[in-house]
């Protein structure tokens, strides 16, 4: 009996086929990396935009709270706008603890910055007057100590403030509703400081391009005594 041996040829990939497969895999890897990188960038940008919105919301809430807490204390100016900085004298969160001077201003750095500054708690007319003057100096030429007491709220291209007095919105620097003199000028009768607080304050912010919120943003505050406790 004769045995017949058969040789089976082994099949495989040619060099060209391997190179094509490797090229396709490399292309898929590049596309996948770009997709993941794009997703990461989108997530980072979304997170940044969300942080900007939350920070601005917190800043506006603080603005409203500062106005709600205005202190019509004798011989103390409760609110003053000089075209550069809005200074406020407000009660502290803890009743009876004292007063605080708060200031809001825009600093020309980069696209502009909207900033809030606050003083330590003051309990005497002398310490209030020092804090009041310090707030004005901070808005013009802040030193390291002043900057340690400020908070950056948002980038800001421009801002405007209006008072609601006599049934109409007007420039705070107009003659109507002139602010009560500071504690340096004694002789102010008790209760007259409250006349310096306008019935409303309008804040108009111009937010720069490239942020989560851009363009003009207007926020009106109504004095609690006018709005039935709501502003």
Image (spheres, rainbow, N blue to C red):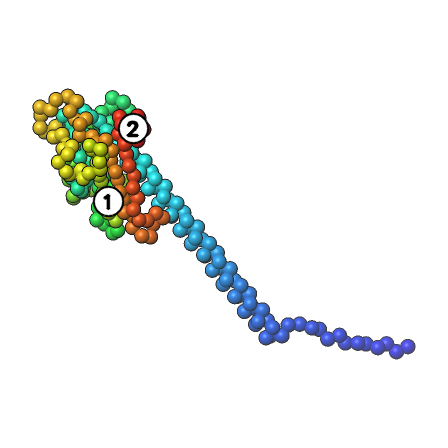
Quarter of the figure with residue 41: bottom left
Badge 1 crowding class, 10 Å Cα cut-off, few under 14, some 14 to 19, many 20 or more, is some
Q: Name the residue at the front extreme.
A: 167
Counting from the top left corner in percent of width and height, residue 202 is at: 25, 38
Q: What residue do we see at 60% from left, 73% from top?
A: 17
Residue nearest the observer in this picture, 230 or 8? 230
* Label 1 secondary element: strand
Please tell me whether residue 166 is drawn above or below residue 160 in the rendered image: above
The numbered mark at residue 88 is: none
**Left-right relation of 63 to 2:** left
* Label 2 secondary element: loop
Q: What residue do we see at 12% from left, 28% from top?
A: 183
Residue nearest the observer in this picture, 60 or 199? 199
**Left-right relation of 27 to 118:** right
Q: What residue do we see at 30% from left, 44% from top?
A: 217
Q: Nearer the viewer, mark 1 or mark 2?
A: 2
Counting from the top left corner in percent of width and height, residue 96 is at: 25, 21
- Per the image, the residue denoted by label 1 is 159
Residue contact between numbered discs 1 and 2, judged by CB atoms under 8 Å: no
- Per the image, the residue denoted by label 2 is 227
Please tell me whether residue 155 is drawn above or below residue 134 in the rendered image: below
Location of the C terminus by quadrant is top left
Location of the N terminus by quadrant is bottom right
Residue nearest the observer in this picture, 145 or 35? 35
Q: What residue do we see at 15% from left, 21% from top?
A: 190
The answer to whether any part of residue 203 appears in the image is: yes
Counting from the top left corner in percent of width and height, residue 151 is at: 27, 40
Counting from the top left corner in percent of width and height, residue 84 is at: 18, 42
Residue nearest the observer in this picture, 214 or 26? 214
């Amino acid at each position: 009996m004769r045995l017949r041996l058969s040789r089976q040829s082994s099949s495989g990939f040619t060099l060209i086929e391997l190179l094509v497969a490797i090229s396709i895999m490399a292309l898929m890897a590049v596309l996948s990396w770009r997709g993941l990188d794009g997703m990461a960038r989108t997530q980072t940008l979304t997170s940044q935009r969300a942080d900007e919105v939350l920070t601005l919301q917190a800043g506006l809430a603080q603005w409203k709270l500062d106005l709600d807490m205005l202190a019509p204390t004798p011989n103390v100016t409760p609110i003053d706008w000089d075209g550069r900085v809005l200074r406020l004298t407000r009660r502290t969160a803890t009743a009876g603890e004292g007063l605080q001077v708060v200031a809001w201003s825009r600093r020309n750095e980069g696209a502009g910055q909207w900033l809030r500054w606050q003083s330590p708690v003051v309990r005497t007319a002398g310490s209030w007057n020092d804090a009041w003057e310090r707030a004005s100096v901070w808005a013009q030429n802040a030193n390291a100590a002043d900057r340690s007491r400020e908070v950056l709220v948002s980038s800001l291209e421009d801002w405007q403030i209006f008072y609601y007095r006599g049934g109409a919105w007007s420039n705070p620097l107009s003659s109507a509703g002139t602010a009560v003199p500071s504690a340096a000028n004694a002789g102010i009768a008790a209760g007259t400081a409250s006349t310096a607080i306008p019935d409303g304050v309008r804040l108009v912010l111009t937010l720069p391009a490239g942020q989560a919120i851009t363009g003009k943003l207007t926020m009106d505050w109504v004095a609690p005594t006018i709005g039935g406790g709501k502003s």
